[in-house]
Amino acid sequence: MKGVLYYFSGTGNTMWVANKIKENFRYYGVDISLINMESEQPINIKCYDFMIIGSPVHSGTEPKIVSNFFRKLPNVKKKIKTIVYSTQSGKSSSAVLSMAKSLTEKGYDIFIQTSIKMPNNRYFILGKKSSLEEESQVLIKSSEKVKKVIKLFMENKRLKECNSNIRMKFGRVYGKFLRNSLPRVSKNITSSEECMKCGLCLRNCPKSNITFENGHAIFHSQCMLCLRCIYICPINAIRYKGKKIDQIQKNRIKMLNLIK
């Protein structure tokens, strides 16, 4: 048996979970292919026995890059077992139900629908920064949850978390409102004079939203606020509202296949 895991990961949290999923399936002798939604790789479901979708939660819902990926997914007549998971700083998110509904409409059989709590990479915008001990505990609990979820799947058992339609509809409305405000919010991201002009942020922006002008990195209006640029900067030269950010994602973001 083999499966495919399609993911989008801005700063490494969703990728971290993807790796844990792959590890746990390996215990059962199941091979998982990890494929980044940002890649140009053709979507081929037919050669897999089941599918997994992983996405962070942006503005209360899945990022547009994930929604666009769903549109490209083929409709299926033969129901394919599917796991869908979201990563977020809260305990749960209605985004996972929104994604599950999009997949169900295309014929995919949702076996597992779950939210995985991860460290808050937006602490400087909303919420608070976790201590190292708190972060460690979050990762331990998330690892344990992944193990439990894969065990359920292998036992042919279903799990449907975050199943509130009211919460999902509110999340979609809230998400649309926040998406419309992104051009204004993204103006808060700037580069400092310390910028080495290495181009790492430019080459790895999922929206190709960054250019170099007059010796500075310029962040334009297509920003999805994934925060990848802030956490991959080798000298931490990117600011939010002029403030230097503690790069708490520095270890997890290394898991991404970045363009050097």
Image: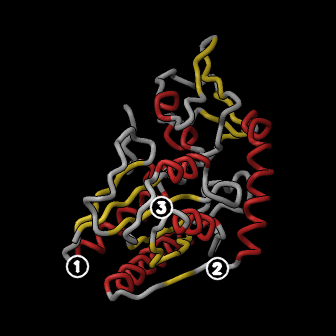
Name the residue beneath numbered marker 3.
Answer: 54
The percent coordinates of residue 189 (x first, y second) are 69, 35
Residue 48 higher or lower than 91, as above or below: above
Name the residue beneath numbered marker 2.
Answer: 163
- Residue 65 in view, yes or no: yes
Q: In which quarter of the image is the N terminus?
A: bottom left
**Cα distance in 3D space between marks 3 and 1:** 20 Å
**Cα distance in 3D space between marks 1 and 2:** 29 Å
First reached walking from the N terminus: tag 1 or tag 2: 1
First reached walking from the N terminus: tag 3 or tag 2: 3
Which amino acid, mark 3? Gly
Looking at the image, which residue is at 42% across and 70% down? 82
Question: Which residue of the protein is positioned furthest toward the left in this rendering?
Answer: 29
Q: Dot 2 lies on which element?
A: loop
First reached walking from the N terminus: tag 3 or tag 1: 1
Front-lying residue, 254 or 171: 171
Front-lying residue, 105 or 92: 105
- Residue 118 in view, yes or no: no
Disc 1: CA contacts within 10 A as few (<14), some (14-19) or many (>=20) = few
- The picture quadrant where one finds residue 76 is bottom left
State the mark number for residue 28.
1
Disc 3: CA contacts within 10 A as few (<14), some (14-19) or many (>=20) = many
The percent coordinates of residue 60 (x first, y second) are 70, 60
The percent coordinates of residue 206 (x first, y second) are 52, 38
- The picture quadrant where one finds residue 39 is top left
Which amino acid, mark 2? Asn
**Cα distance in 3D space between marks 3 and 2:** 17 Å
Q: Dot 1 lies on which element?
A: loop
Residue 145 higher or lower than 50, as above or below: below
Would residue 47 be found to the left or right of residue 200 on screen? left
